[in-house]
Image: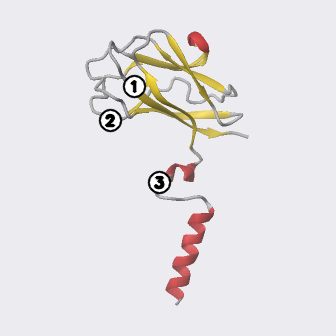
Amino acid sequence: MKKFITIFLLFLSYASIGWTQSSPASLVGVNIIGDFRNLNLNQTNTDNAVAITAPRYTIRRITVANCSTSLAASAATIGVFTGAGGTGSNIVALAVLTTIALSDDVKDLALLLTTKSFTAQTIYIRNGVAHGSAATCDVRIFGEPLP
């Protein structure tokens, strides 16, 4: 009986801090604060607005996934900025996505500002160079809400 109670209390302690197998990032306070589905990579110099769900935050990771086609030979580039037209703070410089060769490949973009907090409620994913044919990807922004 003692073993059962110990296991039950351990379960409750994990449940009280929000731990689940599908969201281990919640243990360290990192959440999805922005999400853009089906980003059209066949556009040039186009801004795609992403609503941010925290009033003040820091960005920890930006991930590109679920691409509709291989980008291994593509010149397509995307960057992330706090202002439209590539203005404001440059969070991710325009980067090629050539490491995405299969639909289940994932790429974490290199962050330029890892120690800065933001209050912009919209940030922009900017297409620099078009892919040249139909291509879409999902972009997910992970961050920590700040007080």
Residue that label 2 marks? 105
Location of residue 101 (image quadrant):
top left
Q: Give the number of marks.
A: 3
Residue 125 position within the rendered picture, expressed as x and y whole percent measured from the top left:
52, 21
Q: How is the image coloured?
A: secondary structure
Looking at the image, which residue is at 31% across and 28% down?
100
Residue 75 position within the rendered picture, expressed as x and y whole percent measured from the top left:
33, 14
Looking at the image, which residue is at 59% across and 58% down?
18
Hey, what amino acid is under mark 1? Thr
Looking at the image, which residue is at 48% across and 9% down?
45
Hey, what amino acid is under mark 2? Asp
Residue that label 1 marks? 136
Residue extending farthest right: 147
Hey, what amino acid is under mark 3? Ser
Location of residue 50 (image quadrant):
top right
Sequence-first tag of 3 and 1? 3
Image quarter hosting the C terminus: top right
Quick one: 25 or 136, which is closer to the camera?
136
Q: Is residue 118 above or below residue 5?
A: above
Mark carried by residue 28: none
Q: Callout 1: 10 Å neighbours few (<14), some, many (20+)? A: some
Q: Is residue 118 above or below residue 18?
A: above
Looking at the image, which residue is at 50% across and 26% down?
111
Closer to the eye: label 1 or 2? 1
